[in-house]
Image: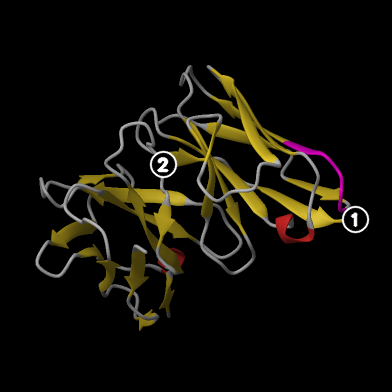
Amino acid sequence: QVQLVQSGAEVKKPGSSVKVSCTASGGTFSMNAFGWVRQAPGQGLEWMGGIIPFFGTPNYSRKFRDRVTITADQSTTTTFLELKSLRSDDAAVYYCARVPPDADKPAFDLWGQGTLVAVS
Amino acid sequence: DIQLTQSPSSLSASVGDRVTITCRASQNIKTSVNWYQQPSGKAPKLLIYSASSLESGVPSRFSGSGVGTDFTLTIRSLQPEDFATYFCQQSFGVPTFGGGTTVEMK
């Protein structure tokens, strides 16, 4: 059973950075696509960017391009999201989610449990 | 980016009701729509992909339809565990989500 397990909650000061990890257990890793999606309190879902570990080149939402870095470590089957210059409106739950390599299923079929990031 | 407009934003229903949620795209996205269920305080769960394909393990009371710009998620007979928020998402371009529909108990 493939699972995505994320790192724990964080409390950060405005202007600082946060790095959230997402470790995949079971199944293959490198050919999946992993996306990062955030959800502010009481709000909807917002895609920030993603990466296919085999290729290593991330793509980012225009909104976050200047502040976000997404990386992947194939040796630990872990993807990372780093968000810099944190503001109060970055307070949210951050999810990693997988898109399988199956071209017939271009959807986020597996989600991590979420990581709460507070900024104050 | 492609905008997705969901309606209604919330609805009240009873167990056994048929529920329909719509999602309209700002441009033709063929069948590139997925639907997710998010119980309160939990991560989203994939229900339907590519407009009408049922994800493995999802009950058959959930169904999806649509092509182009207009899409629908239907719950045939609402069950107690179905009270949650539902989101559509498009995979035609840069991923975007609809604003969500909260299904509440009447």
| Kind of residue sitting beneath label 1 | Lys
Query: Can residue B51 be seen here?
Result: yes
Residue occupying image coordinates x 11% and y 62%: A74
Query: Can residue A64 be seen here?
Result: no
Q: Is residue A24 above or below residue B78?
A: below
- Seen from the viewer's position, the closer of residues A67 and A80 is A80
Residue position for label 2:
A107
- Seen from the viewer's position, the closer of residues A109 and B102 is A109
Is A39 positioned to the left or the right of B66 in the image?
left
Q: Secondary structure at mark 2?
A: loop
Residue B78 x/y as whole percent: 79, 49
Q: Quadrant of the N terminus of chain A?
A: bottom left
Is A82 positioned to the left or the right of B67 in the image?
left
Q: Is residue B95 magenta?
A: no
- Seen from the viewer's position, the closer of residues A32 and A119 is A32
Residue occupying image coordinates x 64% and y 66%: B40
Residue position for label 1:
B106
Q: Which picture quadrant has residue B5?
A: top right
Spatial CA span between label 1 and label 2: 31 Å
- Seen from the viewer's position, the closer of residues A26 and A53 is A26
| Kind of residue sitting beneath label 2 | Ala
Q: Which picture quadrant has residue A88?
A: bottom left
Residue B89 x/y as whole percent: 49, 39
Residue occupying image coordinates x 59% and y 69%: B41
Q: Is residue A4 above or below residue B84?
A: below
Q: Which residues are magenta?
A: B15-20
